[in-house]
Amino acid sequence: MIEIKNVSQSYVKGNKVIDNISLKIEDGTVFGVIGPNGAGKTTTINMITGILNIDEGDIFLDGKSIQKEPIEAKKKFGYVPDTPEIFEKLTGLEYLNLIGDVYEVEAKAKLEIINNLAKEFGIFEDLKDRIQTYSHGMKQKLLIISVLMHNPKNWILDEPLTGLDPKASFLLKQLMLQHASKGNVVLFSTHVLEVAEKICDKIAVIDKGKLIFVGTIQELKEKSKTNSSLEESFLKITGE
Amino acid sequence: MLSLTSVIIKNSKRQELTNTNKFLTIFAFFIVAGFLSLVMVGVSITATLRLKEINQSYAFVNMLFLMNFVILFSESIFHSLNILYFSKDLNTFLRMPIKSKDLVGAKLKDMILSQYEMEILMLAIPTITYGIISKVSALFYVYLFVILLILPIIPIVISTLIIAIIMRFTNFIKNKSKVMYITIILSVLLLGIVLGGFGDTKQDFTVSTFEKIILQADGLANEISNRFILIKPIMNTLLNYNNNAGLKNLLIYFLETIIVYEIGVSIISRIYLKGAIGTVINGQKFRKKLDKLTQIDLKKRNKEKTYFEKELKITLRSPIFLIQCILMPLLYPVITSIVIFAILRFAQKVNVDVMRDILQKVKNGLGYSAFLAVAQGFFMLNFSSIIAVSKEGRSSILLKTFPISLEKQFKLKTRIGIIINSLSIIIITTTYYYLFKNFILALLMFISLELLNVFGEKWKLLVDLKNPQIKWSAEYTMMKQNTNVMYELFYTILVVIFLAFIGLIFKTVENTSICILCILILLNVMMDSYIYKNIRKIFKNLF
C-alpha cells in the first residue's frame, strides 16, 4: 500500500509544484497517474521513491515513511525512471548483479528471473554487452527486469511503456496486471490514455501540481459528464 | 559559417548554474586565478633572475613555449577526438546540409578559442614578467600578442589530422571506449614521430656539452630552439624582437600556420564524415553473446563491495575518468620523484651539493608543512571524488532509490580517491624518513596525511553534490567544463596557507607536527558530524 499524506513540494519558494496532495493506493490495484506535461507526475513519483525531499507532509510505503525510515521504505518498492539512464559502462549482467546484491537477492532467485524475463524480452544474449551499446528499448527492458529482481510489493513505474516494442509492451502490461492480482500495488504514470483505460483499476489526474481527480475511469466519465472516451473526459476535467 | 561556429561555441560553454553557484564560482575563479597568477609571476621572477646570472635568461621563454607546445599537442588529441567525433551535437549537425569543411572549420575554431584561457596563465603572464625584468620594448609585447593568437593553431590542426586519419580507418569499431584507447595510443606514437622528425637530435646531451652551452650568452635558448625546429620561429621572434630577424621569424611562423591550417582542414574535411558517421551509430559489430547463465555468474555478494566495484568499473572503463582519477594521481608523484631524483643526481655530478641546502632549509616546522603541502598538491590532481556523482550522469537518479544509506554511499564514493592518494602519502613519508631518519615524525606525517586525504576527499564530494554536473552528453565535455574542479584548487590554496601558517607559528618540527595532527583530527570529526546531520540536505541537489 502507498499512502501520500498532505504532500507539498516547491523548487522555488512560494511556487508549489505539488500542492497538498493526499492519496491512498490500496493493495491489489493498478493505479495510473495521468496529467498534462509539467503537471507534476514525475515530481510526485520522485517524492514517493525518495529521489526528491518532501517539503511538507509524508509518504508511506507499506507503513514505512520514506522520510523517517528511508532504507526500510526503499526495500518496499521497485522503480523504473522515465528515462532509462542506467550505469552505461556496466554490462547488462553486471547491472542486474548490482541490483540483486543491493537488494540482497539470492543467486537462485536472480537466475530464475533473468532466465525467464531476459529471454522473454529478447535481451538475454546481449547481457554481456555494455549498456552503452543498448537501444532505448533494451535499456527500458533491463530496468524492468532489475525492478522485478527483488520481487517488491510495490512497483513504481514512470512512463514505463515508452520505447518498448509491441511484444515487450504487451508483456509488461500482463506482468503489471498479474502483479496487482496477487495483492500488490502497481503505480505508473503515462501519457497514453488508452493504456490507462485498459489496465488501470483507478486513476489520479494531476494538473498544475494539484490532484483534481481520484477514482475509477467510470467515475471520471461521470464527473466530466461525458460518455465517450477517457481522452475526452480528461480534456474536459483538465480544461484543455 | 560564422553562425555555425558561434552555435558550437555557445553550446560547448553552456553551463547550468544557480545564481548562488554562479557567484561562488566567479569568486573562486578570481581567487584561484589571482593565486595562480601570483605563483606564475613568482616562479618567472626567480627563474629569469637565476638564469640571468649565467646569461641565459631567454632560455626561460624558450622552455615555456616548448612546454606549452607539448601540452597543447597532447591535450588536443583528447579534445579533437571528443569535439569532432564523440560530441552529442553530431547527431544534429550530420543531418543538416552543412559542408564537411564548414563543420570541421567551426569545430577547430571552438577548440582554438578554448585554449586562450590557458595561454593567458601559462604563457602570457610568465612571458610578460620576463619582459618586465628584462626591460624589453613595446615591440616585444606586440609580437607576443600575435604569437599567442596563432600558437594553438598548428598543434590543434596536426593532432586533429592524426585523429581523423586514425578514425577514418578504425570506424569499423563501434565501441566508443575501445576507439578512444586505440586512437589515443596511436596518436601519441604518431605525435612522437612527428615531433621527433622535426627535432634535431644528432647532438648528444652530456655534462661537457652542457658546460659549453651555458658559457655562451643565450646558448641554452639557442640549444632548445635548434632541437625543436617546428617552433624555432616563435622562439627566434621574441629573442630577436628588436631587429629584422624577429619580424622575419614571425612571418615564417605565420606562413607555417596558414599552410598547416589550410592543408590540414582540407584533408580532415575529406576524411571526416566517414569516421564521424561511424561513431554516431550505436552498437558493437562483434557482440559477446551470452549462451547460458549459472548461479556462479550471479553469486550473491556483499552490497557495499558490489557498490564499490560499480564505482571502480565506471572509472576504469572511461578513458578520461581513468586518466584524471587513476593514472594522473598515480603517475604524477612517481614522475615528480624521478625528476627530482635525476636533478639531484645531476647536481651531484656537477659538484653542487643541493641536498645539504635542502636538508638545512626543511629541518623546521615550515619544512614539515612543506612536505604536507606537496602531498596536498598531488591530492589536488586526483579528480575521483570531485566527479564521484557527476561521472554517473543521469543514472545517478538511481542512487537515491537504493536501500543503502546515503551516509554509506557518501563514504563508498570517496574510497577510490582515498586509496589512490595513498601512493603520494607513501612516497612523501618515505622521502621524509629517508632524509631525516626519524620514525616517529614520519609516522606522524603519515597519519596527518591520511587524515588530510580523507578530509579532502569528503570535501571534494561535498562540492560535487552541491553542484552535480549530471546532464552531460560526453564524459570529456563534463570534465572539461566542470567548474567544480576549480574548488579543488581553491581548497588546496587554503590548505597550503594553513600549513604554512602553522609551520611559521610553531617553528619546530615536533610542535608543528603535533599541532597539525590535532587540528586534522578535529576537522575530520567536525566533517563527519556535519555529514551525518545534513546527509539529506547534502544529496538534495541531486535531482
Image (tube, coloured by chain):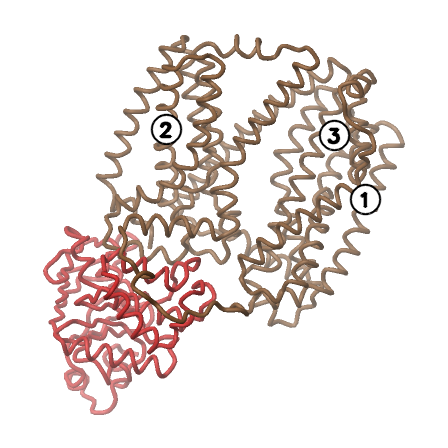
Chain colours: A red, B brown
Chain letter for mark 2, please: B
Q: Amino acid at mark 3?
A: Asn
Residue at the spot 20% in from the left edge and 57% down from the top edge: A74
Sort mark 1 into few (<14), some (14-19) or many (20+) by Cα contacts within 10 Å.
some
**Residue B235 image-quadrant placement:** top right
User: Label for residue B254?
Assistant: 1
| Classed neighbour count for the residue bearing mark 2: other residues with Cα under 10 Å, few (<14), some (14–19), many (≥20) | some
Residue B502 appears in which quarter of the rendering? top left
Taking depth in this image into account, of B266 and A168 the one nearest to the observer is A168
Query: Tags 1 and 2 in contact by the CB under 8 Å rule?
Result: no
Residue visible at 43% across and 51% down in the picture: B391
- Label 2 and label 3: CA atoms lie apart by 39 Å
Q: Percent from the top left, x then y, of residue A125?
A: 41, 72
Q: Amino acid at mark 2?
A: Glu
Amino acid type shown at disc 1: Phe
* Quarter containing the N terminus of chain B: bottom right
Q: Nearer the viewer, residue B401 or B329?
A: B329
Regarding mark 1 in the picture, which secondary structure is present there? helix
Q: Which residue is farthest bottom?
A: A227
Q: Chain of mark 3?
A: B
Per the image, the residue denoted by label 2 is B450
SS category of the residue bearing label 3: helix
Which residue position is annotated with label 3? B62
Which chain's residue wears label 1?
A: B
Q: Position of residue A235 (x, y in %)?
A: 28, 81
Q: Do callouts 1 and 2 point to residues on the same chain?
A: yes
Rendered position, B299 above or below B113: below
Position of B134 relative to B378 (above/below): above
Q: Earlier in the sequence, mark 1 or mark 2?
A: 1
Mark 3: give few (<14), some (14-19) or many (20+) Cα within 10 Å. Answer: many
